[in-house]
Image: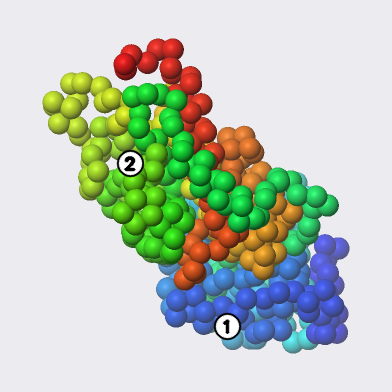
């Protein structure tokens, strides 16, 4: 039986809508969390939100009903779906497309909505035009400052009057305010897999091209006679793939997959030292004309991850190889070194920001601000900059199936444009790549992308040398 809640309410019958049944749904098992959401209801919600995947972030029965824990697990996660359950059999909650951040502001969100399931029907309520969707404070989640979940750190829902949503508490949750569960899911959009009519960048995916790139890199000579090897600094968030890029380049010139630099996935940076990695042309071969410099991963919070002052010291050539970072105290050069400027050979000549393609849209404001601060410092020194966009195969199913589809994928093109906009760099300075991560053998398409990116880094460094050459005092 259909019950109309208001003019903004749409009721869906038990059978659902065909589009909803086609929605791609990820079955959730994040850490040891088990979702309470029935599969049929999950499919309906995923279809309602437009072909999305749900990942369970927070479960009140496991983590507690405290607002502080909710924010610890759910802040800066992008769009989220809150699902509450009561003993009267109602499954209800709300969706917001704007992430939680404890900003202390009223949040406008035209996509916000409330929903309710009971027996054979599903209903949802859209936000009324001109009203704020929620208040983003340190308390529990609320919608329209009307409907509060985990109210006062208790397993309860609380409704107070308001006009943002037209709520009928009897129809929405049967006036049963006691919760026996509350869950929050991260909502991720399935990428639209579409193909451009022609490639938006031209790449030759041939063994001859790989050989040509390797030869150009081997024979590269920096524009400045005082510099024998270009120093390239890799900067990026934890887990973005800085160390993996070195391992991948080293693998290509070694002739098989290597894992010299520590890489993997962890909550905090696996790289805790400043490392300068030269690459040899084959085992026992001569050093190639570049050095890849690896740093501790960036983290959004102060006192965690790489410090911006450390980056400034690295750029100016003061930080030695294997210096161990201390997030609580920036690097202090000894008096002898501090009294003289580093030589051009010791300085950084190109900065590369390494960004995970699957996490661009989830980049927090704090991390984006940190990257902007670093970019301002690099700009002040005139050092060349570019972006390496990693994990393109994980971001787009089309590319996962065939890496040669990279430059005909409209989704990857949109991610390149998003990186360009967020970091303030030209689109031409954003290069998508796939590092070696689980492969046991080298692969032609990976090599072509990685070598193309490295060649661009060397070219960008030459642009830097060309710019400073008139005032360079080295002989």
Q: Quadrant of the N terminus?
A: bottom right
Residue 100, quarter of picture = bottom right
Q: Nearer the viewer, residue 361 or 100?
A: 361
Task: Mark yes or no: residue 365 visible.
Answer: no
User: x%, y% of residue 466?
Assistant: 48, 21
User: x%, y% of residue 285?
Assistant: 34, 50
Q: Quadrant of the C terminus?
A: top left
Residue drawn at (31%, 45%) of the image: 276
In the image, residue 113 above or below residue 47: above
Q: Which residue is mark 2?
A: 307
What separation in Å lies between label 1 and label 2 (alpha carbons)? 41 Å
Q: Residues within 10 Å of mark 2 (few under 14, many from 20)?
A: many
Scheme of colours in the image: rainbow
User: x%, y% of residue 130?
Assistant: 75, 46
Residue 317, quarter of picture = top left
Q: Nearer the viewer, residue 26 or 241?
A: 241
Helix, strand or loop at label 2? It is: loop
Residue 160 numbered mark, or none: none
Task: Mark yes or no: residue 38 visible.
Answer: yes
Residue drawn at (43%, 64%) of the image: 257
Residue drawn at (64%, 38%) of the image: 427
Q: Which residue is mark 1?
A: 36
Helix, strand or loop at label 1? It is: loop
Q: Nearer the viewer, residue 300 or 127?
A: 300
Q: Is residue 26 left or right of residue 200?
A: left
């Amino acid at each position: 039986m259909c019950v109309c809640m208001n003019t903004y309410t749409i009721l869906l019958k038990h059978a659902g809508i065909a589009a909803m049944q086609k929605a791609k749904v990820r079955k959730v098992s994040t850490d040891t969390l088990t979702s309470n959401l029935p599969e049929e209801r999950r499919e309906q919600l995923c279809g309602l939100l437009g072909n999305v995947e749900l990942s369970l972030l927070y479960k009140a029965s496991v983590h507690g009903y405290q607002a502080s824990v909710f924010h610890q697990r759910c802040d800066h996660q992008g769009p989220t779906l809150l699902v509450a359950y009561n003993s009267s059999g109602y499954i209800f909650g709300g969706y917001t497309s704007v992430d939680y951040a404890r900003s202390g502001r009223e949040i406008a969100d035209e996509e916000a909505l409330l929903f309710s399931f009971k027996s054979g029907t599903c209903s949802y309520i859209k936000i009324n035009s001109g009203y704020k969707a929620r208040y983003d404070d340190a308390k529990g989640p609320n919608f329209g400052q009307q409907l509060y979940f985990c109210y006062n750190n208790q397993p309860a829902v609380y409704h107070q009057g308001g006009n943002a949503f037209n709520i009928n508490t009897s129809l929405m949750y049967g006036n049963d305010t006691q919760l026996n569960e509350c869950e929050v899911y991260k909502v991720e959009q399935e990428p639209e897999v579409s193909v451009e009519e022609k490639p938006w960048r031209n790449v030759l995916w041939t063994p001859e091209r790989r050989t040509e790139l390797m030869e150009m890199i081997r024979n590269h000579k920096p524009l400045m006679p005082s510099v024998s090897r270009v120093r390239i600094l890799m900067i990026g968030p934890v887990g973005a793939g800085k160390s993996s890029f070195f391992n991948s380049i080293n693998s290509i010139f070694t002739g098989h997959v290597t894992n010299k630099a520590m890489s993997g996935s962890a909550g905090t940076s696996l790289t805790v030292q400043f490392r300068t990695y030269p690459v040899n042309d084959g085992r026992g071969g001569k050093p190639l004309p570049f050095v890849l410099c690896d740093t501790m991963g960036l983290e959004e919070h102060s006192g965690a991850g790489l410090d911006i002052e450390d980056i400034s010291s690295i750029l100016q050539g003061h930080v030695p190889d294997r210096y161990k970072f201390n997030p609580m105290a920036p690097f202090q050069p000894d008096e002898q070194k501090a009294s003289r400027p580093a030589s051009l050979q010791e300085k950084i000549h190109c900065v590369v920001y390494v960004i995970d393609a699957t996490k661009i849209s989830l980049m927090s404001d704090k991390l984006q601000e940190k990257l902007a601060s670093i970019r301002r410092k690099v700009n002040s020194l005139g050092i060349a900059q570019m972006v390496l966009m990693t994990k393109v195969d994980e971001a787009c199913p089309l590319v996962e199936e065939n890496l040669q589809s990279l430059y005909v994928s409209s989704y990857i093109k949109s991610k390149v444009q998003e990186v360009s906009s967020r970091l303030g760099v030209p689109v031409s300075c954003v290069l998508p790549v796939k590092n070696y991560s689980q492969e046991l053998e080298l692969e032609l398409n990976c090599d072509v992308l990685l070598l193309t990116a490295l060649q661009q880094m060397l070219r960008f460094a030459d642009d830097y040398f060309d710019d400073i050459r008139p005032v360079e005092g080295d002989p």
